[in-house]
Image (tube, grey):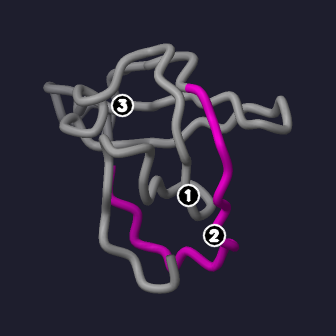
């Protein structure tokens, strides 16, 4: 789901393992929209043993598998990259 706010969080760069993939339905306007939008999330276990859940596109969701480990870069709620599988262009990374 596209967010329309400015992401002012720090960029986090750490090693992580993908531990869960979630797909759920989202109704942006209950009662007016009869077909839900899919919301995709990837849950990572970071090297500090804390988890982070990041909302991603369907493409990003489908190119990774649970159990894969790699370098995770994200900013707040936004995934920037994970290993060699997900790479996005982002200034300052």
In the image, residue 58 lies at what x, y percent? 22, 35
Does the stretch in magenta take in 53?
no
Identified at 53% across, 29% down, the residue is 69
Identified at 69% across, 28% down, the residue is 45
Q: What span is in magenta?
A: 1-17
Q: Secondary structure at mark 2?
A: strand
Q: Nearer the viewer, residue 2 or 46?
A: 46
Query: Mark 2 against mark 3, which lies toward the viewer?
Result: 2
The label on residue 42 is: none
Residue 9 position by quadrant: bottom right
Which residue position holds label 1?
74
Label 2 vs label 1: CA separation?
6 Å
Which residue position holds label 3?
40
Q: Secondary structure at mark 3?
A: strand
The label on residue 11 is: 2
Label 2 vs label 3: CA separation?
21 Å
Among the two numbered marks 2 and 1 on one chain, the one whose residue lies closer to the N terminus: 2
- Please rate how many residues cluster around mark 3, counting C-alpha atoms within 10 Å: few if below 14, some from 14 to 19, many from 20: many
Identified at 50% across, 14% down, the residue is 67
In the image, residue 34 lies at what x, y percent? 15, 26
Residue 52 position by quadrant: top right
Task: Say whether residue 72 is left or right of residue 9.
Answer: left
- Please rate how many residues cluster around mark 2, counting C-alpha atoms within 10 Å: few if below 14, some from 14 to 19, many from 20: some
Task: Please say if 36 is above or below 8.
Answer: above
Mark 2 and mark 1 in contact? Answer it, CB < 8 Å.
Answer: yes
Residue 38 position by quadrant: top left
Identified at 55% across, 56% down, the residue is 73
Does the stretch in magenta take in 15?
yes
């Amino acid at each position: 789901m596209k967010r329309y706010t400015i992401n002012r969080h720090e960029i986090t760069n750490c090693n992580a393992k993908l531990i869960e993939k979630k797909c759920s339905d989202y109704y942006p306007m209950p009662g007016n929209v009869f077909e839900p939008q899919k919301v995709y999330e990837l849950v990572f276990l970071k090297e500090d043993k804390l988890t982070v859940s990041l909302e991603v596109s369907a493409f990003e969701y489908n190119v990774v598998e649970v159990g894969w480990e790699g370098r995770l870069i994200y900013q707040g709620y936004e995934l920037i990259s994970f290993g060699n599988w997900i790479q996005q262009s982002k200034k300052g990374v």
